[in-house]
Image (tube, rainbow, N blue to C red):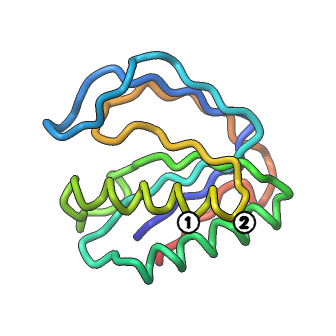
Amino acid sequence: MRILLSHVDFIEYKPVKKEIESAENVDQKVRRVEEAVVAFVAVEKEDGEGKVETAINEILKSLENLGVRRVVIYPFAHLSNELKKPSEALEVLKRMEVLLKQKGVETYRAPFGWCKNLHIKVKEHHLAEQLKVV
Protein backbone atom coordinates (compact mmCIF):
# COMPACT_ATOMS: atom_id res chain seq x y z
CA MET A 1 0.00 0.00 0.00
CA ARG A 2 1.25 3.44 -0.87
CA ILE A 3 -0.19 6.52 0.78
CA LEU A 4 0.60 10.14 0.07
CA LEU A 5 -0.56 12.24 3.02
CA SER A 6 -1.24 15.92 2.39
CA HIS A 7 -2.25 18.42 5.07
CA VAL A 8 -4.65 20.74 3.26
CA ASP A 9 -6.53 23.95 3.79
CA PHE A 10 -9.19 22.35 1.59
CA ILE A 11 -9.88 19.73 -1.04
CA GLU A 12 -12.68 19.87 -3.59
CA TYR A 13 -13.48 17.04 -5.94
CA LYS A 14 -16.24 16.23 -8.37
CA PRO A 15 -16.76 12.88 -10.10
CA VAL A 16 -16.98 13.58 -13.83
CA LYS A 17 -16.59 10.27 -15.66
CA LYS A 18 -16.48 6.59 -14.72
CA GLU A 19 -13.03 5.15 -15.40
CA ILE A 20 -13.95 1.51 -14.78
CA GLU A 21 -17.13 -0.50 -15.20
CA SER A 22 -17.26 -1.31 -11.48
CA ALA A 23 -17.09 2.34 -10.36
CA GLU A 24 -19.26 3.22 -7.39
CA ASN A 25 -22.66 4.75 -8.04
CA VAL A 26 -22.48 8.34 -6.79
CA ASP A 27 -24.07 11.68 -7.51
CA GLN A 28 -21.81 13.93 -9.51
CA LYS A 29 -21.74 16.95 -7.25
CA VAL A 30 -18.80 18.90 -5.87
CA ARG A 31 -17.59 17.85 -2.42
CA ARG A 32 -15.44 20.15 -0.29
CA VAL A 33 -13.65 19.30 2.94
CA GLU A 34 -11.67 21.93 4.82
CA GLU A 35 -8.71 21.61 7.23
CA ALA A 36 -7.98 17.93 6.71
CA VAL A 37 -5.36 15.38 5.87
CA VAL A 38 -5.91 13.83 2.46
CA ALA A 39 -4.72 10.23 2.21
CA PHE A 40 -4.13 9.52 -1.48
CA VAL A 41 -4.15 5.70 -1.41
CA ALA A 42 -3.01 3.06 -3.90
CA VAL A 43 -4.04 -0.42 -2.78
CA GLU A 44 -1.51 -2.98 -4.00
CA LYS A 45 -1.84 -6.69 -4.85
CA GLU A 46 -0.41 -7.99 -1.57
CA ASP A 47 -2.34 -5.65 0.74
CA GLY A 48 -4.41 -7.43 3.37
CA GLU A 49 -5.82 -6.74 6.83
CA GLY A 50 -2.39 -6.40 8.43
CA LYS A 51 -1.39 -3.66 6.04
CA VAL A 52 -4.71 -1.90 6.60
CA GLU A 53 -4.02 -1.79 10.35
CA THR A 54 -0.49 -0.48 9.76
CA ALA A 55 -1.77 2.15 7.32
CA ILE A 56 -4.42 3.31 9.79
CA ASN A 57 -1.77 3.64 12.51
CA GLU A 58 0.44 5.72 10.18
CA ILE A 59 -2.49 7.98 9.32
CA LEU A 60 -3.39 8.37 13.00
CA LYS A 61 0.20 9.32 13.86
CA SER A 62 0.18 11.99 11.16
CA LEU A 63 -3.17 13.34 12.32
CA GLU A 64 -1.87 13.58 15.88
CA ASN A 65 1.38 15.29 14.80
CA LEU A 66 -0.58 17.83 12.77
CA GLY A 67 -3.39 18.35 15.30
CA VAL A 68 -6.05 17.37 12.76
CA ARG A 69 -9.08 15.09 13.29
CA ARG A 70 -10.45 15.03 9.74
CA VAL A 71 -9.25 12.79 6.90
CA VAL A 72 -10.25 12.24 3.28
CA ILE A 73 -9.45 8.82 1.81
CA TYR A 74 -8.81 9.48 -1.87
CA PRO A 75 -8.30 6.47 -4.18
CA PHE A 76 -5.17 7.25 -6.20
CA ALA A 77 -3.96 4.39 -8.40
CA HIS A 78 -1.16 6.55 -9.85
CA LEU A 79 1.12 5.76 -6.90
CA SER A 80 1.72 2.12 -7.91
CA ASN A 81 1.97 -0.27 -10.85
CA GLU A 82 1.08 -3.29 -8.68
CA LEU A 83 -2.60 -2.62 -8.00
CA LYS A 84 -5.12 -4.94 -6.39
CA LYS A 85 -8.23 -5.84 -8.40
CA PRO A 86 -10.70 -2.93 -8.27
CA SER A 87 -13.40 -4.78 -6.29
CA GLU A 88 -10.83 -5.87 -3.70
CA ALA A 89 -9.21 -2.43 -3.53
CA LEU A 90 -12.59 -0.82 -2.88
CA GLU A 91 -13.17 -3.19 0.05
CA VAL A 92 -9.79 -2.21 1.53
CA LEU A 93 -10.64 1.49 1.22
CA LYS A 94 -14.04 0.94 2.83
CA ARG A 95 -12.34 -0.97 5.68
CA MET A 96 -9.95 1.94 6.20
CA GLU A 97 -12.92 4.31 6.36
CA VAL A 98 -14.69 2.18 8.97
CA LEU A 99 -11.59 1.83 11.15
CA LEU A 100 -10.84 5.55 11.10
CA LYS A 101 -14.43 6.37 12.04
CA GLN A 102 -14.24 3.83 14.89
CA LYS A 103 -11.17 5.73 16.16
CA GLY A 104 -13.23 8.93 16.31
CA VAL A 105 -11.79 10.51 13.17
CA GLU A 106 -14.14 12.53 10.97
CA THR A 107 -13.66 10.55 7.75
CA TYR A 108 -14.68 11.09 4.13
CA ARG A 109 -13.95 8.87 1.14
CA ALA A 110 -13.80 10.08 -2.45
CA PRO A 111 -15.62 7.88 -4.96
CA PHE A 112 -13.77 4.87 -6.34
CA GLY A 113 -13.40 4.27 -10.07
CA TRP A 114 -14.07 7.80 -11.24
CA CYS A 115 -12.10 10.45 -13.05
CA LYS A 116 -12.52 13.48 -10.80
CA ASN A 117 -11.95 17.20 -11.07
CA LEU A 118 -9.62 18.00 -8.19
CA HIS A 119 -8.86 21.33 -6.53
CA ILE A 120 -6.62 21.26 -3.51
CA LYS A 121 -4.67 23.74 -1.42
CA VAL A 122 -1.83 22.08 0.47
CA LYS A 123 -0.49 23.80 3.56
CA GLU A 124 3.01 25.23 3.50
CA HIS A 125 5.02 23.47 6.20
CA HIS A 126 7.61 20.69 6.31
CA LEU A 127 5.10 17.98 7.34
CA ALA A 128 2.47 18.98 4.77
CA GLU A 129 3.29 16.08 2.43
CA GLN A 130 4.51 12.64 3.44
CA LEU A 131 4.76 9.41 1.43
CA LYS A 132 4.13 6.22 3.40
CA VAL A 133 4.88 2.79 1.97
CA VAL A 134 3.19 0.09 4.03
Q: Nearer the viewer, residue 41 or 122?
A: 41
* Left or right placement of residue 26 versus residue 37 in this view: left
* Left or right placement of residue 58 versus residue 76 in this view: right
Residue at the limit of the structure toward the top, as seen here: 29
Please tell me how crowded label 1 is: few (under 14), some (14-19), or many (20+) other residues with Cα within 10 Å.
Answer: few
Image x and y of residue 72, in percent: 59, 45
Which quadrant would residue 12 be assigned to in this image?
top right
- Type of amino acid at the residue the image marks with label 2: Ser
User: Is 34 drawn above or below residue 68 in the view shown?
Assistant: above
User: Is 118 drawn above or below residue 103 in the view shown?
Assistant: above
Say whether disc 1 or disc 2 marks the residue closer to the N-terminus. 2
Residue at the limit of the structure toward the front, as seen here: 102
- Residue at 44%, 62% (x, y): give it: 95
User: Is 11 drawn above or below residue 29 in the view shown?
Assistant: below
Please tell me how crowded label 2 is: few (under 14), some (14-19), or many (20+) other residues with Cα within 10 Å.
Answer: many
- Residue at 56%, 64% (x, y): give it: 99
Residue at which label 1 appears: 131
Residue at the limit of the structure toward the bottom, as seen here: 50
Residue at the limit of the structure toward the left, as seen here: 21
- Residue at 50%, 27% (x, y): give it: 13
Q: CA distance from mark 1 to mark 2?
A: 11 Å
Query: In this rendering, which labeled residue sits more in front, label 1 or label 2?
Result: 2
Image x and y of residue 65, in percent: 82, 66
Q: Nearer the viewer, residue 113 or 78?
A: 113
- Type of amino acid at the residue the image marks with label 1: Leu
- Residue at 69%, 64% (x, y): give it: 103
Image x and y of residue 41, in percent: 45, 57
Q: Secondary structure at mark 2?
A: helix
Residue at which label 2 appears: 62
Q: Secondary structure at mark 1?
A: strand
